[in-house]
Image (tube, helix red, strand yellow):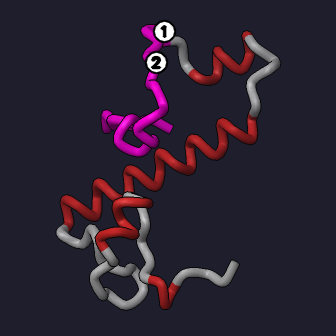
Amino acid sequence: MGHDIEVDIAAFLPDDVEVVTDDRTEPVEDAIADDDAIDLELLGQLEADLDSVDQALKAIDGGTYGMCAACGTDLDPASLQADPVRTLCEAHLPVR
């Protein structure tokens, strides 16, 4: 899965979390082969998060960012601040 989008992950983290960069460029597959300690569940979640960011960027380009994907109403700005990749209004969120 290749992504040409550069994301500032710090924008999605709380202010008290420090972002540490790593200049390594080894592909994820090589890292998994080299390090059995990689948590594949975490890797799957990170890929899903990246897909959500990709979809949010497409919505920005398409002029639909901040709108409910189910009904088209504007999402609450506070909800988007808390979850910038949110796609559903309160009425359409799955029951937890």
Quadrant of the rendered image containing residue 13: top left
Residue 24 badge: 1
Q: Residue at x 31, y 86 (%)?
A: 72
Quadrant of the rendered image containing residue 39: top right
Q: Residue at x 42, y 71 (%)?
A: 87
Q: In the figure, is residue 43 to the left or right of 14?
A: right
Q: Is residue 92 above or below residue 29?
A: below
Give the total number of marks visible in the rendering.
Answer: 2
Q: Is residue 69 above or below residue 78?
A: below
Residue 4 in view of the camera: no
Examine the structure image and report whether residue 7 is included in the region drawn in magenta: yes
Amino acid type assigned to the residue bearing label 2 in the image: Val
Q: Residue at x 35, y 68 (%)?
A: 78
Q: Report the predominant secondary structure element of the magenta stretch.
A: loop
Q: Residue at x 47, y 84 (%)?
A: 90
Amino acid type assigned to the residue bearing label 1 in the image: Arg
Identify the element where label 2 is drawn: loop
Residue 91 place in picture, x, y as percent:
49, 90
Q: Which residues are magenta?
A: 1-25
Q: Is residue 91 above or below residue 25?
A: below
Q: Are marks 2 and 1 in contact (CB under 8 Å)?
A: no
Q: In the figure, is residue 77 to the left or right of 54?
A: left
Q: Can you identify the residue that label 2 sits on?
A: 20
Residue 92 place in picture, x, y as percent:
51, 87
Quadrant of the rendered image containing residue 4: top left
Q: Nearer the viewer, residue 51 or 95?
A: 95
Residue 7 place in picture, x, y as percent:
34, 37
Residue 57 place in picture, x, y as percent:
29, 54
Examine the structure image and report whether residue 43 is included in the region drawn in magenta: no
